[in-house]
Amino acid sequence: MDRRDLLKAAAALSLSQLAIPIVRRANAQAAWPARTITMIVPFPAGGQADLAARPTSLALERILGKPVIVDNRAGGGGGSVGNGAAARAEPDGYTLLMTLSSLAVLPEADRLFGRPVSYEVSQFAPVARVLADPTMLTVPASAPWKTVQEFIKDAKKRPGEIPYGSSGPYGTLHVAMEMFAASAGIKLLHVPFRGAGPALTGLLTGTVQAVATAPGTVRAQVDDGKMRVLACWGAQRVASFPDVPTFQEIGYKDVEFYIWAGLFAQQALPEPIMTKLREAMKEAVLSPEVKKTFEAAGSPVAYLDAPDFAKFVDTDSTRLIAAVKKIGKVE
């Protein structure tokens, strides 16, 4: 074999070796999922993200034929630890994130306080919106306030004394309450918990006297006579709470907040896997058993596929970031 033939052989070998990892990646994408999928929920059990994740994960297991494990990875305030872990995960479709509208708020809050930013929203690719409910101003049934006007009147008499619970600084529940407090001209006492579930437990035990939370997380407690809902942050009344007025009805036109839950993957997730995941999520969220579960909880399905969900996230995030900047530094 002369020198020219040797060079041709070497070049052909190099090209074939380069092609091996490409073929392996293509095979891995075609075979997805080949093992257990982890769905990170950056909050403890009992909140809106957990409510969205549980039925959805079971339906995905049935559709994809592989286990889908819900990993409640709370910490860092408002979900930043779980969000950050999902952002740093390998973009292979085996680590997903079911999170809330606070996803866009938390990096902005870090910048506001001069803290290191644990992740950026640009690291995520929206897959599907699952739920989208206005938050509800909820108090213990034993509380003296029967209306939001009575609550505001009492808060003005004793500024900074009525404690309210949240899922952590600048989480969904915190921003909603501070938005209301700023508009009503009242000062409340913020008591952060590790998630909405623990905050609701604090409401039941008397640690706090108010919480802003999703309808589906309090429906059973209201029906049992343990909690009372005074108002909601939506533009319209919630169907499962038809007698509860909106803040806008009461006169606070700028008080509007939605606690949505949606599934995200990493921005670098290969398109073949994203396509399969989107198709599976559509089938899961719109399945009769999942819809029935959410409706029974008072949080009907609010499904959006990836393109529409991405537009929704952009619009909602812009509004929430503006609200955070207006609220400024609050503890």
Image (cartoon, rainbow, N blue to C red):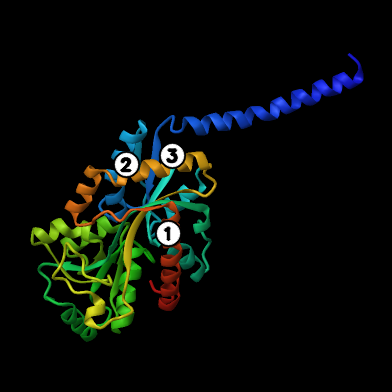
Q: Amino acid at mark 1?
A: Leu
The residue pinned by badge 2 equals 57
Task: Residue under label 3, please give it.
Answer: 276
Tag 2: residue type? Ser
Instruction: Name the residue at 54% across, 29% down.
Output: 27
Place of residue 191 in the rendered image (x, y in percent of width and height, measured from the top left): 29, 67
User: Is 172 placed above or below 287 here?
Assistant: below
Which quadrant does the N terminus fall into?
top right
Q: Secondary structure at mark 2?
A: helix
Question: In front: 268, or 44?
Answer: 268
Q: Position of residue 203 (x, y in %)?
A: 19, 63
Q: Secondary structure at mark 3?
A: helix
Q: Which residue is mark 1?
A: 103
Q: CA distance from mark 3 to mark 2?
A: 15 Å
* Other-residue count near label 3 (Cα within 10 Å), few / some / many at <14 / 14–19 / ≥20: some
Residue, x 28% and y 79% (percent of image)?
A: 160
Residue 276, above or below 183: above
Is residue 314 rendered to the left or right of residue 144? Answer: right
